[in-house]
Image (cartoon, rainbow, N blue to C red):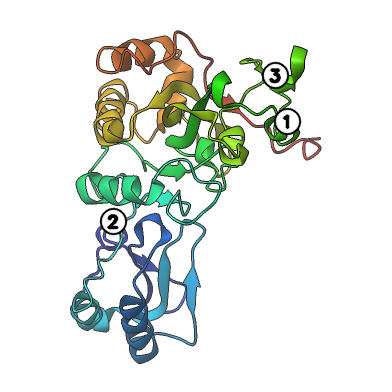
């Protein structure tokens, strides 16, 4: 029997070192999984796999040491719990996300909702060129490291003060880590927009609600990747409304497919570095004029081999 390893890998079945053995990568969008589903996965892993499962760095569960003869049984039994196998290759991968604002006190945006929507509408879509990764961070702490993805979303809130409701307690200034708020004349808080990172801490600690969210959305960085030659994505949009996420990614994908034509296996960030960021900015601005920034810099390559060269 001849096995097409590339086709299997594209479907989430990854060849291991052992003869006839594969890792089966499961789809866990946003890193969230219902307990009954988790129990079913454990049951299937114990029945067909090795002594452990692996939790990947992108929030997937991987079943280890699965013999290819058991593929059909594994898929069928996992399907009973609505668990779908993930994908690899030149496709849109499963989005990763933090807990968002549902229970995380730092969360500003519902990242879980965004991740599930992207997974439902874009997961597995072929890029024709290379992998395409998406991440959602609910706040500037950026636990999912969104800037190291092809498109990374980071929750942000622009604060606004209602002077009439302010009791001048100074809690906002004390809790403003970037130092964007100071207590001015008459102990009135003053906001300097330049150091402000839109973390929303002032809104959270204000006891009277004097600080409120003027605008909330995602700051979007594009062109990041990890691997042998890491690249940090740069800012292309600010305060993108949550409802525009899927359409925004779809437009980035369309630009990527067009510009990468004939260039083989090439990541989005490499295309932006080659073309410069302005063409993509202009293309995105047509649809999202209120969010796309006026200018930006290309994705930034990290030289992580310093000291290794002779």
Percent x, y of residue 131: 37, 43
Residue extending furthest bottom?
Answer: 47
Q: Earlier in the sequence, mark 3 or mark 1?
A: 1
Percent x, y of residue 256: 31, 26
Q: What secondary structure is found at the residue carrying circle 2?
A: helix
Picture quarter with the N terminus: bottom left
For this rendering, which residue is in front, 203 or 240? 203
Q: Earlier in the sequence, mark 3 or mark 2?
A: 2
What crowding class fits label 1: few (fewer than 14 Cα within 10 Å), some (14-19), or many (20 or more)? some
Q: Are marks 2 and 1 in contact (CB under 8 Å)?
A: no
Q: What secondary structure is found at the residue carrying circle 1?
A: loop
- Determine the image quadrant of residue 200: top right
The residue shown at (42%, 14%) is: 275
Q: Is residue 8 above or below residue 181?
A: below
Q: Is residue 198 left or right of residue 217?
A: right
Percent x, y of residue 295: 48, 9
Where does label 2 land, which residue?
A: 10
Residue 166 seen: yes
Q: Is residue 38 left or right of residue 125?
A: right
Q: CA distance from mark 2 to mark 1?
A: 55 Å
Image disc number at residue 170 = 1
Q: CA distance from mark 3 to mark 1?
A: 8 Å
Where does label 3 land, which residue?
A: 188
Q: What secondary structure is found at the residue carrying circle 3?
A: loop
Q: Is residue 71 above or below residue 228?
A: below
């Amino acid at each position: 029997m001849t096995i097409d390893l590339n086709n299997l890998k594209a479907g989430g079945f990854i060849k291991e070192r052992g003869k006839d053995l594969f890792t089966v990568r499961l789809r866990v969008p946003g890193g969230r999984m219902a307990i009954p589903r988790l129990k079913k996965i454990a049951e299937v892993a114990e029945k067909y796999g090795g002594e452990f499962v692996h939790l990947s760095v992108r929030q997937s569960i991987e079943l280890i040491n699965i013999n290819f003869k058991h593929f059909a049984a594994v898929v069928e039994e996992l399907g009973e719990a609505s668990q779908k196998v993930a994908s690899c290759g030149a496709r849109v991968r499963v989005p990763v996300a933090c807990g968002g604002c549902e229970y995380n006190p730092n969360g500003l945006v519902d990242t879980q909702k965004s991740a599930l929507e992207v997974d439902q509408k874009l997961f597995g879509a072929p890029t024709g060129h290379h992998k395409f990764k998406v991440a959602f961070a609910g706040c500037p702490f950026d636990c999912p490291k969104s800037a190291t993805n092809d498109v990374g979303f980071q929750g942000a809130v622009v604060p606004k003060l209602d002077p009439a409701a302010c009791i001048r307690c100074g809690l906002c200034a004390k809790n403003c880590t970037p130092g964007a708020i100071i207590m001015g004349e008459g102990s009135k808080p003053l906001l300097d927009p330049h150091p402000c990172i839109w973390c929303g801490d002032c809104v959270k600690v204000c006891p009277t609600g004097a600080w409120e969210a003027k605008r909330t959305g995602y700051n979007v960085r594009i062109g990041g990747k990890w691997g042998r030659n890491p690249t940090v994505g740069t800012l292309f949009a600010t305060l993108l409304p949550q409802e525009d996420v899927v359409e925004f990614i779809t437009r980035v994908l369309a630009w990527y497919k067009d510009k990468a034509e004939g260039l083989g296996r090439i990541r989005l960030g490499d295309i932006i570095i080659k073309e410069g960021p302005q063409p993509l900015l202009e293309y995105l601005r047509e649809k999202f004029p209120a969010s796309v920034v006026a200018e930006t810099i290309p994705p930034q390559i990290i030289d992580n081999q310093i000291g290794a060269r002779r």
